[in-house]
Image (spheres, rainbow, N blue to C red):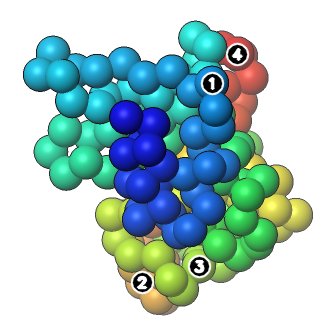
Amino acid sequence: MIHLARMLADIQFGRGAGAALFPDGTTIQLSSTQRLRYLLSGDERIATVRARDSHLTLSMLGAERLHMAFPHPRLRVVASPEAVPFVSAGKNLFARHVLYADPEMRAGDEVLVVDENDRLIATGRAVLAPEEMLQIKRGVAVSVRYGIDEHVRSG
């Protein structure tokens, strides 16, 4: 099953993501229908496999592992300094506060939100395409799932 999880990660995030996210020792929890559901490091969740489309959603631990595995600007959306405190606390990133977005990503992708110094501040789902994030000045660009400040408090 870990092989399947690594394949899903490589397909979704790029070659090498599976090994970075799910090293040996990663534990797996199955759903009630015996499908891959949660991937854990000890008691901490790395990622969840979404039932409707088999895409991975990341925890902050998973986001940290991808952040270390892939160099800037891969998988990243850069937030303006004004937005960093809010996004770090788990609030959504609005388009007017996007300084850069990886041109390879698409709306709906799991992304890493970073500050100008490439410090990871959140993880979430891109609501807009990269070009839209930079052109549109209204609306949510990234629906933040977890902010780093939330992770530090709970971790």
Separation (CA) of disc 4 from disc 2 = 34 Å
Q: Could you say which is closer to the camera, residue 82 or residue 53?
A: 53
Q: Are marks 2 and 3 in contact (CB under 8 Å)?
A: no
| Percent coordinates x, y for residue 143 in the rendering | 42, 51
Disc 1: CA contacts within 10 A as few (<14), some (14-19) or many (>=20)? few
Q: Are marks 3 and 4 in contact (CB under 8 Å)?
A: no
Q: Which mark is residue 25?
A: 1
Q: Is residue 125 left or right of residue 87?
A: left
Q: Is residue 22 left or right of residue 138?
A: right
Separation (CA) of disc 2 from disc 3 = 12 Å
Q: Which mark is residue 102?
A: 3
State the SS at label 2. helix
Outermost residue, right direction? 117
- Residue at image x 15%, y 45%? 52
Instruction: Give the number of the mark in front: 4 or 2.
Output: 4
Q: Could you say which is closer to the camera, residue 21 or residue 133?
A: 21
| Percent coordinates x, y for residue 102 in the rendering | 59, 79
State the SS at label 1. loop
The N terminus lies in which quarter of the figure?
A: top left
Kindly identify which residue carries mark 4: 155
| Percent coordinates x, y for residue 128 in the rendering | 38, 72
Separation (CA) of disc 3 from disc 4 = 29 Å
- Residue at image x 77%, y 69%? 71
Disc 4: CA contacts within 10 A as few (<14), some (14-19) or many (>=20)? few
State the SS at label 4. loop
Residue 133 visible within the image: yes
| Percent coordinates x, y for residue 45 in the rendering | 52, 24
Q: Which mark is residue 132?
A: 2
Separation (CA) of disc 4 from disc 1 = 20 Å
Instruction: Give the number of the mark in front: 4 or 1.
Output: 1
Which tag, 3 or 4, sits closer to the chain's start?
A: 3
Which tag, 4 or 2, sits closer to the chain's start?
A: 2
